[in-house]
Structure formats: structure tokens, C-alpha cells
Image (cartoon, rainbow, N blue to C red):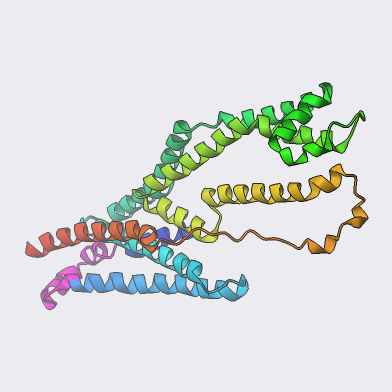
Amino acid sequence: MIIFLFPLVIISYCYNLLSEEKEESTWILLSVQSPSPFRILYKKFVIRFAVIAGVLLFLIILAVPLLDLSINRALAGFFLVSLFYIIVWFAISFWVVSWNKSSRAGAARLLFFWIVLTVILPAVLNHFILSQYPLPEALDTAVEQREAYHEKWDTDQKPTLEKFYKHYPQFRSYGFPKESFNWLWYYAMQQMGDDESKIQSDQLKAKLWKREEMSRTLSYFVPGLHAQLQLNDLTGSGLADQLRFTKAAEHFHESKRLLFYPKIFANEPTGSINWKQFQLEYYNEKSKVNWLVMLGPLLLFSLLFYFMGSINFRKQAAL
């Protein structure tokens, strides 16, 4: 809603701020009666900005009890990113209005910028990133992992166990069971599936990180994309958060393997384990908030469009 809907509301409020006055012939009266008629225009922008910012603040305040949100740095960052993104669109509207065109032309130009900045440009950049870093490793990893596991059913147990003991030398004391099926061999097969697909898995993760880095670099030139990535970081729903969660999950699973493998390999009964010691564990790692990186590009965009609009208005005032 913030990325797509708020800009449309701003456009509907601002596209004809100057053109409407001229089309209704009231701008001439303002020019005669006021020593600085453009100040009135500035005030109109300020009033509309105050209304939109108030709506944003109201929605966030309303969301706190409804969604049981904590009032913390993440929420403050969410509000500031949204506010600065709104300021960007007011600055774009200010610049377009300064062209001194008709209401239709102003609306058409602002809608053009909205389509380009929120739909077309992000889609083009996404396609470019996907073409730069394709992911055939995603399929290769799944295929290699499944084949490495399933083919072990048709091979001798000893080579599989040797590879397993190379990965976990602390378990070598369990030796080489002679039964046709045993849990040591079963989990060794599972581990070999992971080990033999590790190269493809590491390549996949590396490319995903490169996608993330390129997305952030390119987002500095697209306000909507930058705001979306920053909001994703603040809410913990971005690609970087997913990759960090995957890594944390791998460490979690590894710790549980090292805990349960000795018990399973020794055929300990499940009743001998104190299951109450295992409590729910949560992943709480969040992206660090860098205020300059988060808000700086949006502020620069706002200043750029405001500066260009101010130049146009000064030229008109000098005529």
C-alpha cells in the first residue's frame, strides 16, 4: 500500500495545484494581490503533505494494538522510511507542477512517473539481475542430493560409512555394523546426500547473496525499490533475512545431530531421554539499522526534485 497506493493519492491531490488556478483565472488575482503568489502554492503542498503524513501516522498507531507491535527502532524506521518515501513523491509532484502545464498534462506526466518508478523500472532491474545471476544450481542441488542418497541403497555400506566417519571422526568408534540395515548407515546415507551436493549448494547461496547485493546497489537509483528493500529489512522478510535464517537453521540442525547421533547409534531407548529439556527455540536475528543508508537515498531524491522544481518556479517568478 505504501509503495503503490500512497503515491497515487499524492498525485490526485497535487497534479493540478497550479494549473487549476490558471485554468479558472484565479492565479492572476493571486499574482496581483500577493507579493509572492508561489508561497501560497508552497503552503498548499505543505497542507497536503501534513494530511498524508497524518494518515500514515494514524495507520501505524492503529496497527500497534491491532497487530500487537512493539514500539522500537524497527517501527520507528518503518515510519521514517514511509514518510521519506512520501516526501519523494511530493517532491516529484512539486517538480512536475513547476513545468506549468495543463491539468491533463500534469496528471499524465505524474502517472507516467508512477508507472515507470513503481512497476516498469523495478521489473526491468529484476529481470537484469536474474539474467546476471541465473540459478541452475537450485535444480542441480536437489537432483544431486536425491541421487547421492538413493544410490547408497544399492552400494556397500562400508564406503558410505567411511565417508561419514571422515565427516564426523568422533563417531568412528561405532565401527561397521554387519546388519543389512542399521541406523548408523541410514543417517550416513542422509549425510552423504548433503555432502555430495555441497558444492552446488554453496554456489547457490553465493549467487543469492550476489543478487541481494546488486539489488541494493541498483535500488539507490529507484526510490520505490529502495523503500521496499528497507521495509523488508525492518520487517525481517527480505532475501538477506531468508539466507541468514537458512544458515541459522543449518547450525541448529547440526547441533541436534551431534546431540542425538550418539544416542541413536547406541540404540538407547527413547524413554531414557529427558525430553522436557528441549524447549522451543526462536530465530531472532534482525538486520542492523543503518539510518544513513536507509534514509539517505530517499532524502537525496527529495532534495533533487525539490531543487529542480524551485529553479522552474524562480524562472516563472522572474517573468
Q: Position of residue 195 (x, y in %)?
A: 67, 33
Nearest the camera: 242 or 276?
A: 276
In this picture, residue 93 sits left or right of residue 283: left
Q: Position of residue 33 (x, y in %)?
A: 13, 78
Nearest the camera: 237 or 251?
A: 251
The answer to which image quadrant residue 12 occupies is bottom left
Say whether residue 225 is visible: yes
> Residue reaching furthest front?
173
Q: Going 75% across and 46% down the picture, which residue do you hit? A: 257
Asked whether residue 23 is drawn in magenta, I would say yes
- What kind of secondary structure does the magenta stretch mostly adopt? helix
Residue 44, compared with residue 187, is above or below; it is: below
Count how many numbered circles sit on residues in the image. 0
Asked whether residue 62 is drawn in magenta, I would say no
Say whether residue 149 is visible: no
Q: Position of residue 193 (x, y in %)?
A: 72, 32
Residue 137, compared with residue 105, is above or below; it is: above
Magenta extent: 16-38
Residue 270, compared with residue 121, is above or below; it is: below
Q: Going 62% across and 73% down the picture, which residue do you hit? A: 66
Q: Going 20% across and 60% down the picture, which residue do you hit? A: 307
Q: Position of residue 281 (x, y in %)?
A: 70, 60
Nearest the camera: 100 or 119?
A: 119
Quadrant containing the C terminus is: bottom left
The answer to which image quadrant residue 52 occupies is bottom left
> Residue reaching furthest left?
319
